[in-house]
Image (cartoon, grey):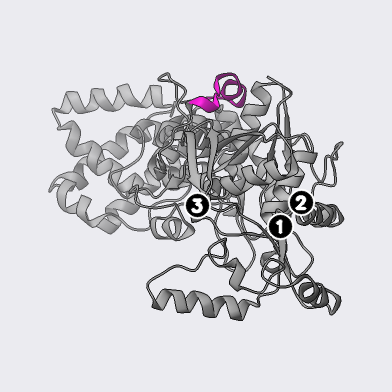
Amino acid sequence: MAQVRVRFAPSPTGPLHIGGVRTALYNYLFAKKNNGTFILRIEDTDQARFVEGAEEYIMESLQWAGIKVDEGINEGGKDGPYRQSDRKAIYRQYADLLIEKGDAYYAFDSSEQLEALRTESEKAGNTFIYNAANRDKLSNSISLKESEWKEKLSKGEPYVIRYKMPDNEDIHFDDIIRGHIVVNTSTLDDKVLFKSDGMPTYHLANIVDDHLMEISHVIRGEEWLPSLPLHILLYRSFGWNPPLFAHLPLLLKPDGKGKLSKRDGDKMGFPVFPLFWPFGETAKGYREEGYYPEAFVNILALLGWNPGTEQEIFSMEELIEAFSIERVGKSGSRFDPEKAKWFNHQYLQQRTNEQLALDFREFLRAHGYHFDIVELEVLIGLVKERVSFVKDIWEQTDFFFKAPESYDKEVIKKRWKDDSASLLLELRSVLEKIDDFSSAAIEPVVKAWIEEKGYNMGTIMNAFRLVIVGASRGPHMYDIISWIGKEETLRRIDKGLSVIGK
């Protein structure tokens, strides 16, 4: 294989969708697997849709995910600049070259004229296509006399440059994922290559940049598949060898019906962007929701690519080693938000109690609680397996830090018996006499007392949990009271009895 050079070429028109991050990831994995180069190119030719802050958002998203750029705006490289608006002077010469070759032409039709033609065709039940079937009847350098269109140019009339699509020709091309494809040009329109504002369209700039940057493989989303015949023809017109193409399947809604969108995330409560988007209509991100970047990458890697094994947890290094573009499927991949949480749970379990305690301590400080790391490590060990995110630790441990303010009425109705109050008073006396308040020391003493008295274990422990926690939740009771200490344990028993009733 010749030197592998791939590029991720997003447009800064808003937040980067996770489908875009997956495209970047697959390009990165393919490049690293083949000792190649991963390029980040910002395609901002559509100035009307440019959004301030989007370019920085793209770069920060890739950095957070661990997708390292080899050549780009910040990194530099032999083929810069890597922002298309900074390459504006390059493109016009290639548009002119196509005109000289007879493969492109000037078109003077106004947007209002074209819209009227589309409306007229729709009323007749047809679809208007600007191509060989009707270009002779429109205002362009093919239909007009040379003196006429040159006069328009000299007068500075607005125009675009369109590609002259061949008439009724079968275009053959191959896709690594989808195989051999044939498209007849009669179904295609004469795409605009150069706009009236002096900027190239995606189609021209993309092809020119890929050629000049020596891109070997174009790995992009399947939404660009309809553009591939034009791109193949542009390579032919320029006399350049095209790169190899691979069009990735869509990311689908959780129900599998349609492309995954922000609306789906808003509706079901999960992010569809890597980072929080702070501009205009804000959107939450995976980073701020508490996902680890390693988990996020693992989630995306398996949405479309099958490693051919049962393995699900991959480090970036393992992904690079295992990745193959040939194992990417054609069908769309359904996004499963619960599976995404499962991935984060797996990565959280790999972190040490100390690492999680340090993360959780920041959360506690924000809520006004200050605890020693060693104490928090013990606490983390009690609930770690129950949580998928650091923020979930609070939901599992809030009762460690504060006594219950209320008691679950359903639990009282179901678990509080006529003798619960008297039994808890007896238990209080037993606990008060214990000097070593470690879990290992408390448990045998309490169990021995219950057995000696012939009491029902469930009756006592259910009532005990209710006054300590306020509900039927939490880890082992002896671990809880050992952590909060004897004084707090006795205080909570007294409070619970006073509120629920003796």
Q: Is residue 56 above or below residue 448?
A: below
Amino acid on which disc 3 is placed: Pro
Quickly name the residue at label 3.
Answer: 271
**Whether label 1 touches label 2, CB < 8 Å:** yes
Identified at 80% across, 40% down, the residue is 212
Where's residue 164, x and y in %?
65, 57
Quickly name the residue at label 1.
Answer: 104
**In this picture, which residue range is highlighted in magenta?**
313-326
| Disc nearer the start of the sequence (3/2) | 2
Task: Tell me the CA gap for discs 1 and 3.
Answer: 43 Å
Amino acid on which disc 2 is placed: Lys
Q: Is residue 76 above or below residue 177?
A: below
Q: Judge whether residue 482 is colored magenta.
A: no
Quickly name the residue at label 2.
Answer: 101
Identified at 84% across, 80% down, the residue is 155
Q: Is residue 281 visible?
A: yes
Task: Tell me the CA gap for discs 3 and 2.
Answer: 49 Å
- Magenta: predominant secondary structure element? helix
Q: Is residue 54 left or right of residue 499?
A: right
| Disc nearer the start of the sequence (1/3) | 1
Identified at 53% across, 63% down, the residue is 133
